[in-house]
Amino acid sequence: MWRLLRPFRDDGISFRRQAPVGVYIVDFVWLSGRLVMEVDGGQHSEATGLVRDAARTQWLESQRFEILRFWNNDVLRNGAGCQEVIAQAIERRRSLSFMK
């Protein structure tokens, strides 16, 4: 994922990796755009993972973050598709009032 985020730096987007956001450590975050990216493995599809992820997502959304979740396999096999989803989210976030 870190490699996939690299081109966005040229556009002034500064991502942080393994960054604290509240009581959580998120995989990747653009703090000023309030955009979080999580790269999930199989444990996230198990019951306990789903419950934890739902609570985490609820809290992050209450803090005005948008969360993008990608499966490990998607990042490895469809990097261009992941980049497109991220680019669309960046444009959405840039249009929000807190960004102006």
Image (cartoon, grey):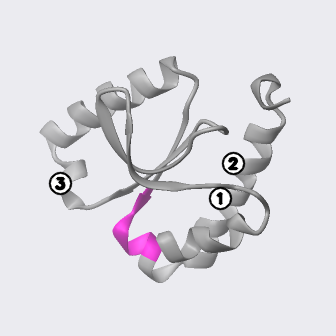
* Residue 8 vs residue 48, the one in the foreground: 8
Horizontal relation, residue 56 to residue 75: left or right: left
**Residue 40 in picture, x, y percent from top left:** 32, 57
* Quarter of the rendering containing residue 80: bottom right
Which residue is at 79% across, 48% downward? 91
> Disc 2 and disc 1: Cα gap in Å?
6 Å
Determine crowd level at label 3: few under 14, some 14-19, many 20+ residues with C-alpha closer than 10 A: few
**How would you classify the magenta stretch by its main secondary structure?**
helix
Any magenta on residue 69?
no
- How many numbered marks appear? 3
**Residue 41 in picture, x, y percent from top left:** 26, 61
What amino acid is at disc 1? Val
Determine crowd level at label 1: few under 14, some 14-19, many 20+ residues with C-alpha closer than 10 A: few
In this picture, which residue range is highlighted in magenta? 70-75
- Whether tag 2 and tag 1 are in contact, CB under 8 A, the answer is yes
Judged from this view, the residue extending furthest toward the bottom is 77
> Disc 2 and disc 3: Cα gap in Å?
25 Å
Which residue is at 45% across, 27% downward? 60
Horizontal relation, residue 1 to residue 20: left or right: right
On-image quarter of the C terminus: top right
Residue receiving disc 1: 85
Which residue is at 65% across, 38% downward? 32
Residue receiving disc 3: 43
Judged from this view, the residue extending furthest toward the top is 62
* Quarter of the rendering containing residue 54: top left
Q: Secondary structure at mark 3?
A: helix
Residue receiving disc 2: 89
